[in-house]
């Protein structure tokens, strides 16, 4: 398309200029590209950040940790380690319970103790 053709369709020359879509039409257009209908949908091929964003959006966050029951800041923790798009495969855990379930807490705890013992010797 030439530059003249592009300019002819911009601003007041655009056939949709000044027109508004009805609420019903906006809802229909939105629903046409929601979830799996979206051309960018990756399903189980979605990345780590995308899955956590999806969980934050669709799994209700409780007030208390699902591990210890304390009222703390909660993270979406994957249970199986496979990172599938399955709400049942995630829990809302506090940072400590999340690290315990992943095995990071044990490594951190024993790793620090090992460092302290080396320093004292």
Image: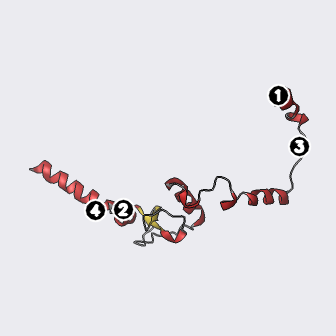
Rate crowding at label 2 as few (under 14), some (14 to 19) or many (20 or more) other CA atoms within 10 Å: some
Q: Which residue is mark 2?
A: 99
Rate crowding at label 4 as few (under 14), some (14 to 19) or many (20 or more) other CA atoms within 10 Å: few
Q: Which residue is mark 4?
A: 106
Label 3 near label 1: C-beta < 8 Å?
no
Q: CA distance from mark 2 to mark 4?
A: 8 Å
Sequence order check, earlier mark of 1 and 3: 1
Sequence order check, earlier mark of 1 and 4: 1
Q: Which residue is mark 3?
A: 16
Label 3 near label 4: C-beta < 8 Å?
no
Q: Disc 1 vs disc 4: which is toward the camera?
A: 1
Element on which disc 3 rests: loop
Name the spot of residue 10 as percent of width and height, x first. Answer: 85, 34
Q: Is residue 10 above or below residue 97?
A: above
Element on which disc 1 rests: loop
Sequence order check, earlier mark of 2 and 3: 3
Q: Disc 4 vs disc 3: which is toward the camera?
A: 3
Q: Disc 2 vs disc 3: which is toward the camera?
A: 3
Q: CA distance from mark 1 to mark 2?
A: 58 Å
Element on which disc 2 rests: helix
């Amino acid at each position: 398309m030439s530059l003249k053709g592009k300019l002819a369709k911009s601003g007041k020359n655009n056939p949709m200029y000044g027109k508004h879509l009805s609420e019903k039409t906006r809802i229909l257009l939105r629903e046409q590209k929601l979830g799996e209908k979206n051309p960018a949908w990756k399903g189980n091929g979605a990345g780590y950040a995308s899955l956590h964003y999806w969980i934050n959006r669709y799994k209700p966050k409780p007030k208390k940790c699902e591990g210890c029951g304390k009222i703390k800041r909660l993270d979406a923790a994957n249970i199986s380690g496979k990172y599938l798009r399955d709400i049942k495969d995630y829990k809302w855990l506090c940072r400590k319970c999340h690290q315990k379930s992943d095995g990071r807490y044990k490594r951190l705890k024993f790793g620090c103790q090992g460092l302290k013992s080396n320093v004292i010797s």
